[in-house]
Image: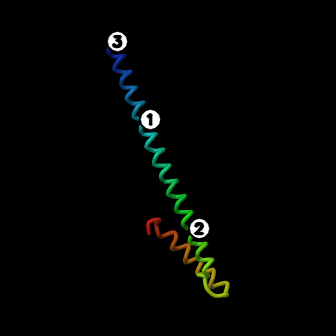
Amino acid sequence: MKARRIVEEEAKALRDKEETELRERELKLKKEKDALKKALKKERKTLRTICMEHDYYGSNDHKTQIKNMSHLEQLCEVLSLSE
């Protein structure tokens, strides 16, 4: 009876440890993902600012500017941070 109880307690302790490790890994992955997302957002904003400052969007024609802005947004969606 005592041996069975000890085995059950050890099994419970092992499960608790595994669950804790799993939560820690998930939290670490979430933090990494959030950091990457934040960096990507910052880089996109920088790119947009540079494009605006150097008149990348082109002519005075409003439709052309919107079209060029749309193309830039499509590029931002496709490219990763390292590219």
When the figure is inspected, residue 32 is found, relative to residue 81, above or below; the finding is above
Q: Say which quadrant the C terminus sits in.
A: bottom left
Looking at this view, name the residue that lies furthest to the top.
1
Mark 1–mark 3 distance (CA, rounded to whole Å): 27 Å
Q: Earlier in the sequence, mark 2 or mark 1?
A: 1
Whether pointer 2 and pointer 1 mark residues with C-beta atoms closer than 8 Å, the reply is no
Question: Element at badge 3?
Answer: helix
Mark 2–mark 1 distance (CA, rounded to whole Å): 37 Å
Which residue was labeled with disc 3?
Answer: 2
38 to the left or right of 18: right
- Of the two numbered discs 2 and 3 in the rendering, the one whose residue sits closer to the viewer: 2
Q: Position of residue 45 (x, y in %)?
A: 59, 67
Identify residue type, mark 2: Lys
Q: Earlier in the sequence, mark 2 or mark 3?
A: 3
User: Hey, which quadrant is residue 50 in on the image?
Assistant: bottom right
Identify residue type, mark 1: Thr
Question: Element at badge 2?
Answer: helix
Which residue was labeled with disc 2?
Answer: 45
